[in-house]
Image: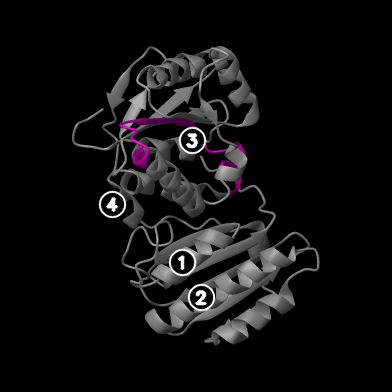
Amino acid sequence: MSAARGYDHAAVHYTSDAELLAVAVPFLEGGLAAGEPTLVSLEPDRAELVRDALAPSAPVEFLVAGDLYARPAAAIRSYRELMAGFVAGGAAGIRIFGEIPQAVIDTSWDWWARYESAVNHAYDEFPLRSMCAYDTRTTPRHVLADVARTHPFVATPDGGHHTNSGYVDPRSFLAVPRPMTPLPIELTAPRVELADPRPSDARRAVAAAAPAGLAEGELDDLVLAVSEIVDNALRHGRPPVRVRIWADAGHVVVTVHDTGVGPDDPFAGLLPADRRVGGRGLWIAHQVCAEVALHHDDTGFTVRLTAGRLPAQAQRG
């Protein structure tokens, strides 16, 4: 691990179970031999594969990937709390071997691309080595392209651990506008459109438009998030502020657009709010919504908030 960094963040590309194990097992066994807290966060079938390859008594902690990776900001918060506890207990090193679940790659990758970049900053205070596994048989090319830009290192099945020449610093990566791929429901006419609404108007409109099948807790969270984002747009954005709401039996999508440039903090939403422009509202939204997408272009800044079931996005080339 580079002496200049607390965090060694490596990508692993594999094409078979054997290749996955060839990287994971030595990495995890090395952590155990060094007396480091050693964790695995993989989907169930691959978690069992790794568990079976380790000694039965190996004190590796297996995390539930689906719960941990519900939302990027929540994952960052959970990992930071976990690692702070290890360091407080005297750990001089920590190892994590994990993966982002395929379901969220398919439905909300742009959100998780921001996560993969932001953690290079968010975890750098900890003595952490982590490896992020990506199955090249099922991972889309545009995702692998982002993986190449968000991991400073690459680990290979032959035991290699190399500096990644394609790595992009988080502030630079996060500052580049990402296209906001329309969700299928956005290709239809919105159920509601509001111009320069007060937060209370937006809250009522979302509550009225939501389908009966949306869980009450999810609706309450979305109403809160929309209120915060509309308040941000009115206070810190540039008029006009436009709110659009789509809803069907499975989910609700809300976009809030203003003609300003958006927050100046590239980590806004993913890291705890410091009350700079957009900080608090985006932090809240990232904690409670099924997905948050951010986009700025020559028309202004847009936040898209989603509650309920997320449809799989069309794969890009």
Q: CA distance from mark 3 to mark 2?
A: 35 Å
Q: CA distance from mark 1 to mark 2?
A: 8 Å
Residue sitting at x 58%, y 19%? 51
Whether label 1 touches label 4, CB < 8 Å: no
Residue sitting at x 61%, y 32%? 43
- Above or below, 7 relative to 223: above
Q: Position of residue 264 (x, y in %)?
A: 31, 67
| SS at circle 3 | helix
Q: CA distance from mark 2 to mark 4?
A: 27 Å
Q: CA distance from mark 4 to mark 3?
A: 21 Å
Label 3, on which residue? 141
| SS at circle 4 | helix
Q: Mark 4: which amino acid?
A: Ser
On the rendered structure, is 178 left or right of 200? left
Q: Of label 3 and label 1, which has the lower sequence position?
A: 3
The dot on residue 228 is 2
Label 4, on which residue? 172
Q: In this view, which residue lies farthest toward the right? A: 212
Stretch in magenta: 87-107
Q: Is residue 187 visible?
A: no
Q: Mark 3: which amino acid?
A: Arg
Q: CA distance from mark 1 to mark 4?
A: 20 Å
| SS at circle 2 | helix
Whether label 2 touches label 4, CB < 8 Å: no
